Image (cartoon, helix red, strand yellow):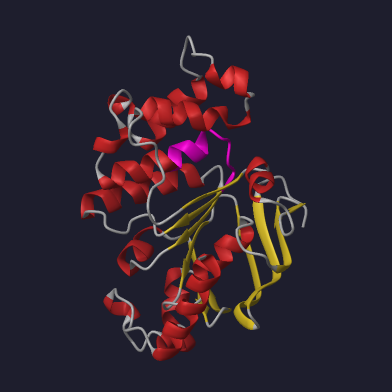
Amino acid sequence: MTMDKEYLEIRGLSVSFDGFKAVSEVDLTVLQGDLRFLIGPNGAGKTTLIDAITGLTPATGSARKSGSELIGKKVHQIARLGVGRTFQTASVFEQLTVLQNLDIAAGAGRSAVTLLRKRTSVLPAIEEALETIGLTALRDRPAGILAHGQKQWLEIGMLLVQNASVLLLDEPVAGMSAEEREETGNLLRRIGDDRVVVVVEHDMDFMRAFASSVTVLAGGRVLSEGTVEQVQADPKVQQVYLGTAAAGYLPPVTAADTAIDEKEEAAHA
């Protein structure tokens, strides 16, 4: 695939845990400007797929970021190629200020000597990130006192100052208020214009409000893909969700889902 814009291209990606295939032969292409939501029942392999792309879990197949192969590379090598991710719980330095968190993230590629040297001014990239994530007024506040949603925005900002052009976000609105979810959706739209953004999500209302396109995983495979309307109208998706997707929530966890979750948790332990 040859194009000017950033893209993430996955072909035949599989992940096995002790012979059990948590992700099986997944094909997925996401282009810059396409806010892609990755949904599916519990145990569908969504987080495992993100782990494989970012080097946390061994995988077979191919995952290419704008032409550069990611599978087989180490986590820090993948990060340097411009692939960033967030986790379900925000990873920020709570004792440090918002500005200091961003400064440390921006210094990820600096030497130890320059990293320890106090900056005399704020980098333009940090100023821009503060504006983008809406935390300019809180730049001197300790990250630990931020609201839950604001910590998630700060973590996204830390990826922005590292020049991440592919962002993989794992349930970014979990536990947020309705207002925070709305602000987060608008933030994802702002950053998604110039980047590849993939959102793993369980909140169906949030998905319907902000997704450009949707990929549905079930049993570690791609079940359906398209616009929100196309995916919701797909009989296969309706069957997997037992008719509950339209109501905005996921079905109860089945015994099969539980077995898959236990396999994934054991592999990550």
Q: Residue at x 43, y 48 (%)?
A: 189
**Vertical comparison of 115 with 9: above or below:** above
Queried whether the magenta region covers residue 266, the answer comes back as: no
Q: Residue at x 76, y 52 (%)?
A: 67
Measured as percent of width and height from the top left, residue 234 is found at: 47, 84
Q: Residue at x 57, y 66 (%)?
A: 49
Q: Name the spot of residue 94 as percent of width and height, x first.
A: 33, 36
Quadrant of the image for the N terminus? bottom right
Count numbered badges in the picture: 0
Q: Position of residue 132 (x, y in %)?
A: 41, 34
In the picture as drawn, the residue positioned furthest to the top comes out as 120
Residue 65 versus residue 208 in the image, above or below: above
**In this rendering, does residue 226 appear at all?**
no
* Residue 256 in the image: above or below residue 82: below
Q: Is residue 163 magenta?
A: yes
Segment tinted magenta in the rendering: 156-166
Relative to residue 166, is residue 38 drawn left or right? left
